[in-house]
Amino acid sequence: MSNLTIAQALRRTKKTRGNISELKTRASEAVSHEAGKKPTFDFEPTCEALANAKEELIKLESSIACANASTTITYEGKSMTLAEAIRRLQELKDQMSWLTSLHIREGVERSSDLVWNDETGRQSRVTTEVTYITKLSERDRVEKIESLRDQFEALNDLVEQANHRTEVKVAV
């Protein structure tokens, strides 16, 4: 059993994921080889190391999940678990992304096309005007995104602070 902060456990999780990826590659390269040529890494020991790394990852992620479910922070006067705060951060990011992707049209847009005129027997330019009414101005969108960004940063700061002070027990 080892004690780590959530932040340390998250870094270790990232490192373990990278290790798993490397071990999978090594095992894939060692599963078959030309007769008389020994692969760089032996298949069975590599698979054993892979299984151990996966077991460590499961324990790390489970410990983090438990800590996230039992650790609370206070944001905007409301108490919430880290698990809820993380979901709220994801939702804030999604909302900012969605607002950024909106195609806002406002005012009159003119377009000009060449069309064939049967009466004159030649092409002529036709201008079309379309008036757009928007429910969200560009200025309002920018203000909403800035507000969401401020909310994200404030909540993320609280989550990071909790991650650096909250210990998790990882059975290794």
Image (tube, rainbow, N blue to C red):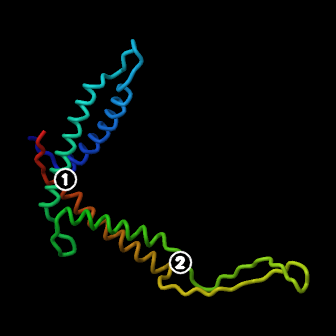
Q: Which circle's residue, 1 or 2, is located before the other in the chain?
A: 2
Image coordinates for residue 114, horizontal then vertical, percent: 80, 77
Image quadrant where residue 98 sits = bottom left
**Residue pushed farthest top?**
36
Please determine whether, in this image, residue 28 is positioned above or below residue 145. above
- Mark 2 is surrounded, within 10 Å at the Cα level, by few (under 14), some (14 to 19) or many (20 or more) other residues, namely some
Nearer to us in this view, 41 or 160: 41
Identity of the amino acid at label 1?
His
What is the quadrant of the C terminus in the image? Answer: top left
Q: Position of residue 18 (x, y in %)?
A: 32, 39
Q: Which residue is mark 2?
A: 104
Residue located farthest toward the right when viewing the structure as drawn: 121
**Vertical arrangement, residue 122 with respect to residue 25, above or below:** below
The location of residue 69, given as percent across then percent down, is: 15, 60
Q: Residue at x 28, y 40 (%)?
A: 15
Q: Residue at x 46, y 70 (%)?
A: 100
Apparent side of residue 108 relative to residue 133 in the rendered image (left or right): right
Amino acid tagged 2: Ile
> Within the image, what quadrant is residue 116 found in?
bottom right
Residue 119's label in the rendered image is none
Q: Nearer the viewer, residue 32 or 38?
A: 32
Mark 1 highlights which residue? 164
Q: In the image, 46: left or right of 145?
A: left
Could you tell me which secondary element the residue under label 1 belongs to? helix
Q: CA distance from mark 1 to mark 2?
A: 41 Å
Q: Is residue 33 left or right of residue 89?
A: right
Residue 17: x, y in percent? Answer: 29, 42
Position of the N terminus, as image quadrant, is top left
Q: Is residue 166 above or below residue 56?
A: below
Say which residue appears at 40% left-offset and 14% top-offset. Answer: 35
Single out the mark in the foreground, 1 or 2: 2
Crowdedness near tag 1: few (<14), some (14–19) or many (≥20) residues, C-alpha within 10 Å: few
